Amino acid sequence: MAAASTPPLVSLRQVSKRFANGTLALQGMSLDCGEHDFISFLGPSGCGKSTALRLIAGLTRSSSGEIAWSRTNSGASTSDRELGFVFQEPTLMPWAKVFDNVWLPLKLAGMSRDAAAPVVTQVLEMVGLSRFADVYPRELSGGMKMRVSIARALVTRPRLLLMDEPFAALDEMTRIKLNNDLLSIWREHRFSVIFVTHSVYESVYLSNRIVVMAPRPGRVVDEIRIDEPYPRGEAFRTSTRYNAHCTAVSQSLHGALHGVDIDH
Ligand SMILES: Nc1ncnc2c1ncn2[C@@H]1O[C@H](COP(=O)(O)OP(=O)(O)OP(=O)(O)O)[C@@H](O)[C@H]1O
């Protein structure tokens, strides 16, 4: 979690996005994402979660407001290579082996296959796919393809990993396994995560902060801290405390959808 003295990695101040067709997809969002935060954007369809993520990634421009990045140790402003993005679909190149899919961001940055090999091998190990470097995506299950996608996002060693409903299409058991593996990678490598989800249960399990959002216009209605220690495992998932957090977050979401302010 962010120490009080550490400046935020990225700050949003009153950020809004109106599309050309007039839709106000996001209205006045403010957020500080700290070093080693795990933040979830939680809300129903159309509340601007993906738009907020795309704004942070620089994939779309805000209509108003400011997005500011902290300076890196080298003094440079945060660059693309310090951001990783994982989409709901793994979006792998079907004609390329797992190794080459993961190498891609480094290849685009000018790194040869040989020079990239140690780091590619290392991230494949992190996601549990060491033995699959030489297979094609079609030979992998949905969960394994998502692991490749996560490895590809981590190969540049980003300070911030943006994840847009990465596990929504996976079965429950695979999702739980990937939740656990993501948390252990995050704890060990100490990057920050912003994670978009529709699931109250997933957001409570993973995050230290949950940003609750509502639609029409897309906006933040609440932020809830999950002050529970990591590592989190089955004991937490089946605890009364976990259930109490899920109830509180559900109530906030429910209140937001009915235009009621929830006081925390
Ligand atoms: N390129 C676009 N042009 C016009 N409107 C858009 C565009 N992209 C998104 N919107 C609209 O902006 C609003 C917010 O969309 P966004 O995809 O950010 O929501 P979301 O919370 O991520 O939804 P979901 O959970 O369904 O992915 C929606 O009303 C959507 O229809």
Image (cartoon, helix red, strand yellow):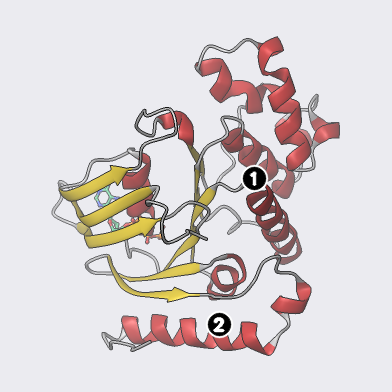
Q: Determine the image quadrant of residue 221.
A: bottom left
Marks 2 and 1: CB-CB under 8 Å?
Answer: no
Is residue 90 depicted above or below 52 in this figure? above
| Residue picked out by circle 2 | 246
Quarter location, residue 76: top left
Q: Is residue 60 left or right of residue 109?
A: left
Dot 2 amino acid type: Cys
**Disc 1 marks which residue?**
189
Q: Position of residue 105 (x, y in %)?
A: 54, 24
- Considering the image in quadrants, where does the C terminus appear? bottom left
Q: Residue at x 51, y 17 (%)?
A: 108
Q: How many marks?
A: 2
Secondary structure beneath disc 2?
helix
Question: Which residue is rendered at x = 33% and y = 65% of the image?
Answer: 47
- Label 2 and label 1: CA atoms lie apart by 27 Å
Name the residue at 74% across, 41% down: 126
